[in-house]
Image: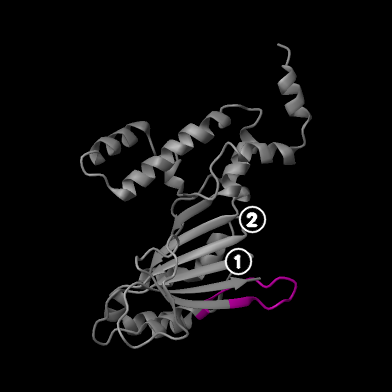
Amino acid sequence: MQPTPFLLRWRALPNELKLLILGFALPSDATFSPLDFSQMRSRNNITYVRKLTEPWPSRERDVAITKSQRFDAELLPLLACPEIATLATEVFYNRNIMKLSHGFSLLPPRRTRSFVRNIRVASIVTLESVGALETLADDVSVFDNLRVVTLDFKENVFWNTHRNDVVSMLQAVDTIRIPTRELIIYVQHTSFRLRDMPTCSEVDATLLPKFSVVAQNGNKPKEELYRYVFDHFDPWEKKPKRFFEVWPKEELFYRVTKKVVRA
């Protein structure tokens, strides 16, 4: 079978231009977890979840279904074409954010990891998660070409009940240097404070200094720190309402501390 004129012209294009063209056909700047498109996600499971949530829609489940549908509708047809499957995979993982749970129990396929540029890791501070922090740099290193790493930490009442243990473990951890150009850390503080619970400033002072990036060409990484509150507690979607140089003593809901480190 003779190739069509279109196919001949397509094959004559450089890969850089092919990637640019495919970028218009695929999602961009969206956040996906590996479960959204892993082999663990069967069509039967998706149908069941969809029926289950129809009477009482759940935002979390609706978002997950939408991402799975986008993967099926926008990427799978391109993967079925050997001519462009590898290029489409590169564009998809290059232009979107991969959301991972602490511990990296589920990762994108090995053959795609060199294409990943942006990951987000979510964690709640517990004794177990603090103990796993020392392996974070090694966990992240499975991605060869990272440019942005975002760490989302949620503070909770655990800081009150195990305060001394958590602080002692964090103090014993050496600075964790993530192999990326830019590191963004969010600490979502509880919207209430219990008696003897650490203040937001104490949490920030204990947790944030433990993270930096690998220095490039001997240059010292540059750091920026922001403290702000939101009308709604959603730091990666909502705009800050008020900024603070230091946290005030009065109670404020939806506090977020953000640290940015650039190599």
Q: Residue at position x 32%, y 36% from top? A: 45
| Residue 222 x, y percent position in the rendering | 63, 77
Question: Does the stretch in magenta take in 219?
Answer: yes
**Location of the N terminus (image quadrant):** top right
Query: Counting other residues with Cα less than 10 Å from the Cα at mark 1, is it few (<14), some (14-19), or many (20 or more)?
Result: many
Q: Residue at position x 71%, y 70% from top? A: 216
Q: Is residue 194 above or below residue 64?
A: below
- The magenta span reads 209-223
Name the residue tied to disc 1: 182
- Front position among marks 1 and 2: 1
Task: Name the residue type under label 2.
Answer: Asp
**Location of the C terminus (image quadrant):** bottom right
Name the residue tied to disc 2: 144
Question: How many badges with numbers are in the image?
Answer: 2
Q: Upstream in the sequence, badge 1 or badge 2?
A: 2
| Residue 143 x, y percent position in the rendering | 59, 55
Q: Which residue sits furthest top?
A: 1
| Residue 239 x, y percent position in the rendering | 45, 66
